[in-house]
Image: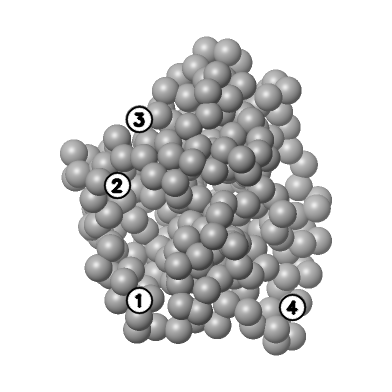
């Protein structure tokens, strides 16, 4: 496995501090607004064991950030058609219902915890089987779709808030230590973002469809998956994980790994085409 941003992440953990437990009034107001908005978002399920999906509206946003060279240049992406995205990371129970097994290191966490120790290739196999079972077109989200859904019309530091403790599980090996208690945690326990999506910052890294590219130079502007470039070098991961520092769970942070790599902090969230 190759984590392309490992050195950058180590430097960011050592050299930059982010206040992840900000209690000021503006952050509290944002949390209340997002919480209220997320309660109004209705989802749908294609089967009893299928993930609950939320319709993500078409729209434009500014993709990228100033955190590292990998987040630049900031550029406009326009997603022309609505799509669906799972409200939570795929759970161990949902994986078992389709695949018949549970590969997770933290299997004792239970069916409501995210499945982990799954590679990009494993996720593709799950998608194939779920599509055959339901007759629908599930897939991994593109990196642009992922960030668009994470930001949910805003420009907050994390996916749904400027306060990471509000929306994410993180920091098992960070200094200072975070809130994950050295493990993954059940999905949907933190605050959702404005579009009703949980755990997009932290808990487990989420595979996307895109090939790894070191910057956004040449990236698609229509929200489609970037399937040219350094595909042999791996695919893109987003969102950070339970064991990572706050900097790594930012809305704009990118990472990548080989398609066969499995680890106790790697999972995914499904997208689905709409009629």
Q: Residue 77: percent from the left, percent from the top?
A: 43, 54
Q: Residue 269: percent from the left, percent from the top?
A: 53, 40
Question: From the viewer's perspective, is residue 239 above or below residue 208?
Answer: below
Which residue lies under the disc numbered 1? 12
Q: Is residue 202 visible?
A: no
- Horizontal arrangement in the rendering, residue 117 relative to residue 106 (left or right): left
3D distance between C-alphas at marks 1 and 4: 26 Å
Q: Residue 232: percent from the left, percent from the top?
A: 18, 39
Q: Nearer the viewer, residue 248 or 27?
A: 248
Pointer 2 or 3: first along the chain: 3
3D distance between C-alphas at marks 4 and 3: 40 Å
Q: Label 1: state its secondary structure.
A: helix
Q: Residues within 10 Å of mark 3 (few under 14, many from 20)?
A: some
Q: Residue furthest front?
A: 108
3D distance between C-alphas at marks 2 and 1: 19 Å
Q: Residues within 10 Å of mark 4 (few under 14, many from 20)?
A: some
Pointer 4 or 3: first along the chain: 4
Which residue lies under the disc numbered 4? 28
3D distance between C-alphas at marks 1 and 3: 30 Å
Which residue lies under the disc numbered 2? 257
Q: Label 2: state its secondary structure.
A: strand
Q: Label 4: state its secondary structure.
A: helix
From the image, state whether disc 2 or disc 4 is nearer to you. 2
Which residue lies under the disc numbered 3? 121
């Amino acid at each position: 496995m190759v984590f392309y941003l490992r050195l950058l992440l180590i430097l960011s953990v050592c050299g930059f501090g982010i206040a992840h437990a900000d209690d000021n009034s503006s952050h509290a107001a944002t949390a209340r607004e997002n919480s209220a908005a997320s309660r109004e978002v209705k989802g749908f399920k294609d089967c009893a064991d299928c993930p609950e999906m939320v319709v993500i509206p078409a729209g434009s946003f500014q993709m990228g950030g100033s955190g590292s060279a990998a987040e630049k240049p900031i550029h406009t992406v326009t997603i022309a058609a609505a799509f669906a995205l799972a409200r939570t990371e795929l759970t161990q129970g949902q994986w078992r219902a389709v695949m018949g097994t549970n590969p997770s290191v933290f299997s004792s966490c239970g069916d409501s915890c995210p499945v982990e120790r799954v590679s990009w290739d494993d996720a593709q196999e799950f998608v194939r089987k779920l599509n055959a079972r339901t007759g629908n077109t599930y897939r991994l989200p593109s990196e642009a779709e992922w960030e668009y859904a994470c930001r949910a019309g805003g420009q907050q530091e994390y996916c749904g808030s400027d306060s990471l403790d509000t929306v994410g599980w993180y920091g098992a090996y960070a200094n200072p230590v975070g809130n994950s208690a050295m493990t993954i945690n059940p999905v949907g326990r933190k605050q959702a973002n404005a579009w009703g999506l949980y755990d997009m910052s932290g808990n487990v890294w989420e595979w996307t469809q895109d090939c790894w590219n070191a910057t956004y130079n040449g990236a698609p502007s229509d929200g489609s998956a970037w399937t040219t470039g350094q595909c042999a070098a791996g695919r893109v991961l987003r969102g950070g994980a339970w064991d990572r520092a706050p900097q790594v769970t930012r809305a704009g942070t990118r990472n990548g790994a080989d398609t066969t790599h499995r680890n106790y902090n790697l999972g995914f969230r499904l997208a689905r085409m709409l009629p």
